[in-house]
Amino acid sequence: MAQYTRVSGSVGLITLQSPPVNALSAAVRQGIVDLMQRALSEPEVKSVVICGQNGIFCGGADIKEFGGQMSGPPLIPMIHAIEAASKPVVAAIEGIALGGGLELALGCHYRIAHSKARVGLPEVTLGLLPGAGGSQRLPRLIGVPAALDLITTGRHVTAAEALKFGLVDQITDHNTVNVAVKFAQRVADQPLDARRISTHPCLCPSDVAVLFEEVMQRVRRTARGAIAPIACVQAVRAAATLPYNQGMERERELMATLFTSGQARALQYFFFAQRAVGRWSMPSGARWDTSKPRPVHKAAVIGLGTMGRGITVALAQAGFSVVAVETQEKQLMEAKQAISGMLERGAKRRGVAPALDKINYGRNIQSVADVDLVIEAVFEDMALKKKVFQQLSAVCKPSTFLCSNTSGLDIDQLACQTRNPELVVGMHFFAPAHVMKLLEVVYGPKSSPLAVATAMQLGKKIGKVSVAVGNCRGFVGNRMLKPYLEQALFLLEEGATPEFVDQVLEEFGFAMGVFRMSDLSGLDVGWKVRLADGLAMPDPTMGQPTRLRQGRRYSPLGDLLCEQGRFGQKTGRGWYQYDKPGSQVAKPDPWLHSFLDEYRARHALVAHRIDHQEVLERCLYSMINEGFRILEDGIAAGPEDIDVIYVFGYSWPRHRGGPMFYAATVGLNKVLERLEHYYQAHPDVPSLQPCHLLRKLVASGSPPIQKWREVIKKVRSQL
Ligand SMILES: CCCCCCCCCCCCC[C@H](O)CC(=O)SCCNC(=O)CCNC(=O)[C@H](O)C(C)(C)COP(=O)(O)OP(=O)(O)OC[C@H]1O[C@@H](n2cnc3c(N)ncnc32)[C@H](O)[C@@H]1OP(=O)(O)O
Ligand SMILES: NC(=O)c1ccc[n+]([C@@H]2O[C@H](COP(=O)([O-])OP(=O)(O)OC[C@H]3O[C@@H](n4cnc5c(N)ncnc54)[C@H](O)[C@@H]3O)[C@@H](O)[C@H]2O)c1
């Protein structure tokens, strides 16, 4: 909807009204069309101002409408009519002008922005391009290089940056609508021809062809298979090389392809999934909207290794006072230096002062007595963690929340060491913790809604996307990683190479294939866990490693590499070879290939030809199957939680929506059928056995992902 008021006698003010972000729904578009006609027909009105209610100009097209039948006046002719208007139209931009919202403003003759406003064309992040003339008007207004940057990245720019680009005409610290109204009065009689951006020539640098080539190459390299960034470059190239009308036609063609693509559907699903995970719930019925968090002012981090350092930086940067505790003197010194460096580099990038004074370092756990929340990040060793939790419980105030950054140990066992187990939750960060967006907030059987709400809110304050999950080995992310890693090893045993498996997964869109990723994280991490679990054998002289452990197929390949000191990048050898320890450039290793040949010969394994399809299906479907088990067990509340975890924590390609959305795209019946096929071929691999929930969903006619929760509820109630 939109509202019309006459201000100062001669200015028609059109206010967009569609909470929460004044998106351009059918009703808003209809309102704009009607009210523009009214303003143009009233002889007293000499100029028009368009603004949005509640300090928000416009969040763009209404994304919810994209999935269904579009109705109401189309956006492009609406914006053309504004640009063609005989009276000056001024956009008063407060809050945000994004996507279609900025395109609307580009159709206006003038743009006035509040100094705190942000503008941008983020369509690319939704699998689209600025399809209401944005790809044609923006380069005409601010030049091709700047337009390419904004449109291919989708980044939001501040009002100050927008002014520098010439994207807005004026910025103000005062009431933007009042300033725009006065401005509109001043320009009421000014000629408009030069203000219509579609009539401008497109400003191109002399080497524009080279620029497009370079940008296209960069975009292809970084897109990981996403098509929208490429279409964005093509659309801007049309602006640079074609007359406006032909450029608009090209924009329409490209948009039509994107609009109906699976990638756009996946990215739009993911947009809403990201927001849905904030509305968490626990099996007890506790929910985000009925559980109030307690404020946290001062926090502590215990253990300043890889993770503790990043967590300390994330907390300090967000303005929290931090007590950082590390028992080893040498580690403490190194940590101080590393944390200060990270804070200084981050502050330089953001143009602020480094938050060095927010941190107090110490070696004694007694120093955390007065903090509101502790995050423990000591070695992944249950006995050590139990001891630390006992100490914390004795030292801290009774109201202190005690959290663990464990990658997968039982939160309940830690809670049992404390006086107030209801205040214990997992806060599972991902490395590097000050960079990675994901935080798994893990509730155990005793965790209170208060503790979950507080950890979720803390996550939000430090800029994380937090997902509340239940307590089980590996939680959601690492639990699903296990069958994925396992299948990758089995594929090597059966004839594949690390390079081939990685190539297939990287072509699918992962930032790194499974073996490259393992080399980066360190092969010793998983090895230690397997040793502790009695899976890996500590001493190879105790006998040939068998390929069956605890009644199921097991691949000792990773253990064998670790026994040779091949821990990955850190030792310069792993699944690949590196020029020197710490180097990141992975090269195929002939030693590894011979080692695999010998291994197969020793175990009488006949290598067979493994193709792309087999790699993808076995790695991904076994992981997805575990995802369904997680849903069945109630560890994740819905598929969105799993998808958000995988995109933000495990580099799953966002344009494929996440593993559960991908399963829905492939077709649940196909996933089921292929899992059945592989399970028949490998009956000693339980992770390939299709789980009950998957079967139930297929039996229920494979409902759309938005309806899975109903089936999940039924399945859980029958357990
Ligand atoms: C047959 C073939 C035909 C092909 C041709 C078809 C042609 C169709 C013509 C289309 C023309 C294209 C026009 C245009 O180029 C396309 C667009 O404009 S796409 C939209 C671009 N805008 C965005 O991407 C902005 C998205 N929003 C945000 O980034 C943020 O929400 C925000 C605006 C910065 C606000 O952030 P926050 O304050 O943190 O708040 P939330 O993010 O939590 O959001 C609150 C609430 O609002 C919902 N919401 C936000 N934006 C939109 C939106 N644009 N549409 C609908 N809903 C929106 C958000 O989901 C939250 O609600 P919740 O999910 O929590 O219920
Ligand atoms: N490294 C990762 O990628 C990653 C990712 C997510 C979670 N985690 C988890 O985070 C935790 C820490 O992992 P990390 O990789 O940072 O380990 P790390 O080995 O780099 O660091 C652990 C630090 O804890 C210190 N420490 C040990 N006992 C202590 C005590 N009693 N008091 C204070 N400090 C003590 C050690 O001296 C060391 O500096 C583990 O539980 C791990 O599973 C690790």
Image: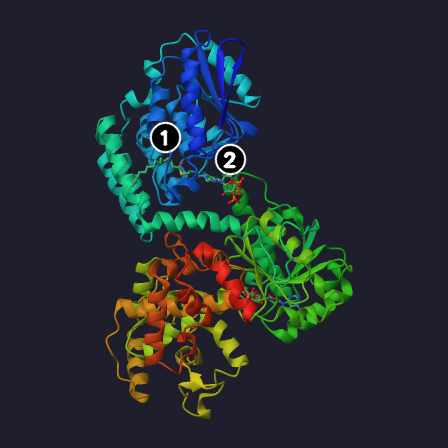
Q: Nearer the viewer, residue 275 or 173?
A: 275
Question: Does 651 appear above or below 132?
Answer: below
Circle 2 crowding by C-alpha within 10 Å: few under 14, some 14–19, many from 20: many
Q: Position of residue 457 (x, y in %)?
A: 62, 50
Q: Is residue 358 left or right of residue 206?
A: right
Q: Position of residue 414 (x, y in %)?
A: 67, 70
Question: Does 193 appear above or below 537?
Answer: above
Viewer can see residue 568: no
Q: Which residue is mark 1?
A: 75
At mark 1, the secondary structure is helix
At mark 2, the secondary structure is loop
Q: What mark, if any, has residue 21 been given in the picture?
A: 2
Q: Nearer the viewer, residue 386 or 273?
A: 273
Q: Position of residue 13 (x, y in %)?
A: 50, 18
Quarter-wise, where is residue 406 in the image? Answer: bottom right
Q: Which quadrant is the C terminus positioned in?
A: bottom right
Question: Does 263 appear above or below 703?
Answer: above
Circle 1: residue type:
Leu
Quarter-wise, where is residue 62 in the image? Answer: top left
Viewer can see residue 163: yes
Q: Nearer the viewer, residue 542 or 411?
A: 411
| Image quarter where ligand 2 lies | bottom right
Q: Is mark 1 within 8 Å of ligand 1?
A: yes
Q: Is residue 453 left or right of residue 436?
A: right
Q: Residue at x 36, y 25 (%)?
A: 79
Quarter-wise, where is residue 386 in the image? Answer: bottom right
Q: Which is more foreground, mark 2 or mark 1?
A: 1
* Chain-order first, disc 2 or disc 1: 2
Q: Is mark 2 within 8 Å of ligand 1?
A: yes
Q: Residue at x 68, y 66 (%)?
A: 446
Q: Position of residue 321 (x, y in %)?
A: 68, 49
